[in-house]
Amino acid sequence: MKLILLGAPGSGKGTQAVVLAKNFKIRKISLGDILREEVKKDSELGRKVKQYMEQGVLVPDEVVGAVIEENIKDEGFVLDGYPRNLAQAENLQKIFERKHIQITAVVYLDVTTETVVKRLSGRRICPQCGANFHITNMPPKVEGVCDACGSKLIQRKDDNPEVIEKRIEVFEAESAPLKDYYQKEDNLLVVDANKDAQEVFMDISSLLKNG
C-alpha cells in the first residue's frame, strides 16, 4: 500500500496518516518530520534545510524534493505534506519512476472552510516534538502540556480565523491543478473529511478495499 494524502490545512492529514500507517502497517512519511530529522542528523541536506529554516523562509522545491527522494523507498508508505503544488507533483512522479514505485492511490480529504476554522482555531501543538492536540476534540491529559514530552503547548500564530481563511484560499488555488493532475492519472480518491476522524478512516479504508 503506497498512498499520498492531500488536503487543506485542518483537513486531518496528520491524523489520518498516523491511523493509516498503524492499520495498514506501512511507514508514515511526513514532510515536516523528515525535514527535522535531516537537520537533526546534520546531513548535507539537513544543513541546507536548516539554513532556510533559520531564515524563516520556505525550503525551495529542489531541496524538499531531494529530501523526499532520500527518504522514500519501494515499500508501503503514506506520504503526508507533499506534494503541495503541481511542480512538486511532477517532480515526485519522476522520483517514483527512478525508484520504480507505483502509487496505490492519492487520497484527497475534502473539507469546508467552516470545518477547518473550527478545527484549527482549537489546535495546540508541541514546539519540541511536533505532537498535535485540540482543546475539545483531542485534549492533552494535562491542560497545556504535551503528553509525549511534557513541553508547554502553543497555538500557531496562523491558527486564527482570518489567517486560516487566507491559507485555505492559497491552498485551493494550488490544489486545483493537483487534483486535475491526479484525476487524469485515475488514482484520485475524494473523501468527505468533515466527519470525525474514525468515520473518515473507515471511508478511506472502504474505498481502498473496493479498488
Image: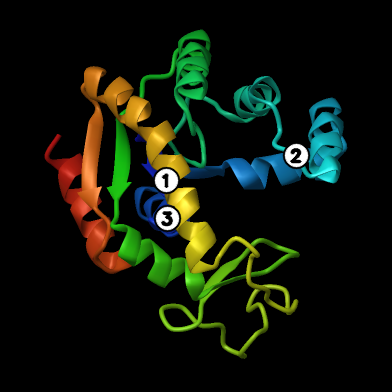
Q: Does 91 sit above or below residue 38?
A: above
Q: Is residue 42 above or below residue 128?
A: above
Q: CA distance from mark 2 to mark 3?
A: 33 Å
Q: Amino acid at mark 2?
A: Val
Residue drawn at (28%, 24%) of the image = 180
Most extreme residue toward the left, as rendered? 210
Report which residue position mark 1 lands on. 169
**In the figure, is residue 156 to the left or right of 109?**
right
Relative to 145, say whether 84 is above or below.
above
Say whether residue 26 is visible. Answer: no
Please provide percent x and percent y for residue 3.
37, 36
Q: SS at mark 1?
A: helix
Q: Secondary structure at mark 3?
A: helix
Residue pictured at 85% horizontal, 31% vertical = 43
Mark 1 or mark 3, which is nearer the start of the sequence?
A: 3
Labels 2, 1: front one: 1
Give the amino acid at mark 1: Glu
Q: Nearer the viewer, residue 191 or 198?
A: 191
Please give the label number shown on residue 57: 2
Judge the density around disc 1: few (<14), some (14-19), many (≥20) Cα neighbours within 10 Å.
Answer: some
User: Quick check: marks 2 and 1 in contact, CB under 8 Å?
Assistant: no
Which is more N-terminal, label 3 or label 2?
Answer: 3
Mark 3 is on which residue type?
A: Lys
Q: Are marks 3 and 1 in contact (CB under 8 Å)?
A: no
Numbered mark located on residue 22 in the image: 3
